[in-house]
Image (cartoon, grey):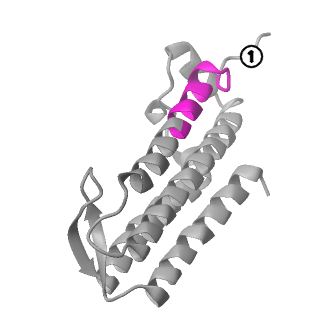
Amino acid sequence: MKLSRAALLLSSLVFIGSLVWVAVTAGDVLPAHFTGSGQVDRVESKSSFLLTTGGIGLVLIGFFASVGWWLPRLPAQLVNLPSRRMHDYWTAPENRPTLNRKMAEDLDWMGAASALLLAWIVGVSGSTVGDSVSVWVLVVPTALYLLAILGYVVFMIRGGRYSIPKD
C-alpha cells in the first residue's frame, strides 16, 4: 500500500473515531458553528450534527479516495495543467498512467489533511463546554491546514513534480 493511501485511510479512521467519540460522550446539543472570536453562534442536536458533519466528511473522503478510479476515465481535455506543453505531455497516452498515479497520490495527501482537520473540528465541537472556545483552538489547526495545502500545491506546480522530464 502506498504511503499516501495509508495516510488517507488512517486519517479517515481518525475522523470516524471522532464521530463515534462524540456520539458516545457528548451531550444532546452540540455547537455547530463558531464565530471568528470562538463564540458559539449555532447549535444542533447531536444526531443532526453527526449526520451533517459525518455525511460531508464521508463524501469528501470518498471523493479523495476515488480519484484513482475516476481520473483515468476523465477525457484529456478536462484535465487542467499549468501550461499547454505540460498538458500535451502528461495527457499523451504513454504518459497518462503516470499522471493519474501522481494526481491520485497528491489528492490522497490532501484528503488525509482534510480528514484530520474535520476530525479536529468534530472533537472541538464535542468537547466544548459553555458558549465559546479559545479562538486559537480553531485558528491554529485551520492555518496549519491551509499552509500545508498551499505548500503542497506549490511543491506540485513549482517543485518539479509535474515537470516534463528531459530527453
State the residue lying farthest toward the top: 167
For label 1, the crowd category at 10 Å Cα-Cα, with few meaning under 14, some 14 to 19 and many 20 or more, is: few
Picture quadrant where residue 124 is located = bottom left
User: Residue 161: x percent and y percent?
Assistant: 67, 26
The residue positioned 27% from the left and 52% from the top of the image is 37
In the figure, is residue 71 to the left or right of 162? left
User: Residue 109: x percent and y percent?
Assistant: 62, 47
The residue positioned 50% from the left and 53% from the top of the image is 114
Front residue of 71/26: it is 26
Front residue of 111/166: it is 111
Residue 150 in magenta stretch: yes
Residue 90 in magenta stretch: no
Seen in the picture, residue 5 relative to 109 is either above or below; the reply is below
Q: Which residue is mark 1?
A: 165
The residue positioned 23% from the left and 74% from the top of the image is 43
Front residue of 71/82: it is 82
Q: Which residues are magenta?
A: 148-162
In the figure, is residue 122 to the left or right of 107? left
In the figure, is residue 55 to the left or right of 70? left
State the residue lying farthest toward the left: 41
Seen in the picture, residue 132 relative to 113 is either above or below; the reply is below
- Considering the numbered disc 1 on the image, is that residue within a helix, a strand or a loop? loop
Can you say which quadrant of the picture contains the N terminus? Answer: bottom right
Picture quadrant where residue 96 is located = top right
